[in-house]
Image (cartoon, rainbow, N blue to C red):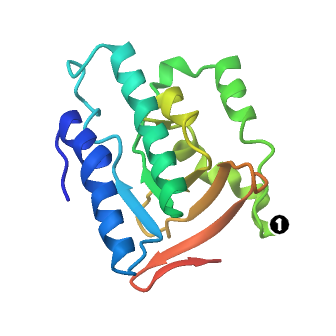
Amino acid sequence: MRVSDGESQYRVLAYQLPAFLDLQQKSQKKIRLVVIDSISAIYRGDGAYKQRFDKMAEICEIGMRLKRIASQYNLAVVTINQVTDVPDTSLKGSAFISHMEEWLDFNLINQQENGRLGLFIHSLLKKPTLGLSWQNSVNTRIRLARSQMMEHVVTRRVLFIEFSPKAKRSGCEVVIDDTGIHAV
């Protein structure tokens, strides 16, 4: 289902999704996973969409609504949030070091790869499009980072658990191919 604006998204999350889940439960076809790709699409690049405060309140409301749905229907909700570049001018000197400190406590499951976290620096510098409001609305944050794309060099990817009440901050290098996602 494609959603193109805030009103449509509200209608889907408030009425259509719960009605669909109710119908599936009654037919004994329980849904265990809802994936929303991309939760931030209706906000991205639309500076005139709403005042900043209204947008933040709406983002928090979406987070609460999705948590309620997950709890009520005993399912997982995965939302994909896009990222945006941070202008280079804003991360010079101590600001850059400060930003990178949040990644220094990460360990990859394969300990031999820990010295290579620098490969993913450009991806780790990106910020989630929905910002702090969304970041604080979710239970678990997982980031997919990749090395820079270069000719004749294999692009590497890492999944990082940024925050979780149930798992420690860690990462795992992965390969994405035609058959799915595989840990390295």
| One can see residue 101 in this view | yes
Asked if residue 44 lies left or right of residue 2, the reply is right
Q: Residue at x 40, y 81 (%)?
A: 28
Residue 152 appears at what percent x and percent y? 44, 70
Q: Residue at x 81, y 68 (%)?
A: 112
Asked if residue 76 lies left or right of residue 151, the reply is right
Asked if residue 154 lies left or right of residue 7, the reply is right
- Label 1 Cα neighbours within 10 Å, binned few <14 / some 14-19 / many ≥20: few
Viewer-side residue, 99 vs 128: 128
Residue 17 appears at what percent x and percent y? 30, 56
In this rendering, the answer to whether 128 lies above or below 157 is: above
**Number of disc labels:** 1
Q: Quadrant of residue 94?
A: top right
For the residue marked with disc 1, what is the amino acid?
Gln
Q: Residue at x 72, y 35 (%)?
A: 102
Residue 177 appears at what percent x and percent y? 43, 80
Viewer-side residue, 126 vs 139: 139
Viewer-side residue, 96 vs 37: 37
Residue 64 appears at what percent x and percent y? 49, 38
Q: Residue furthest front?
A: 26
Quick one: quadrant of the C terminus?
A: bottom right
Q: Quadrant of residue 170?
A: bottom right
In this rendering, the answer to whether 77 lies above or below 174 is: above
Q: Residue at x 20, y 59 (%)?
A: 1
| One can see residue 147 in this view | no
Viewer-side residue, 18 vs 151: 18
Q: Quadrant of residue 31?
A: bottom left
In this rendering, the answer to whether 158 lies above or below 93 is: below
User: What residue is disc 1 on?
Assistant: 111
- Secondary element at image label 1: helix
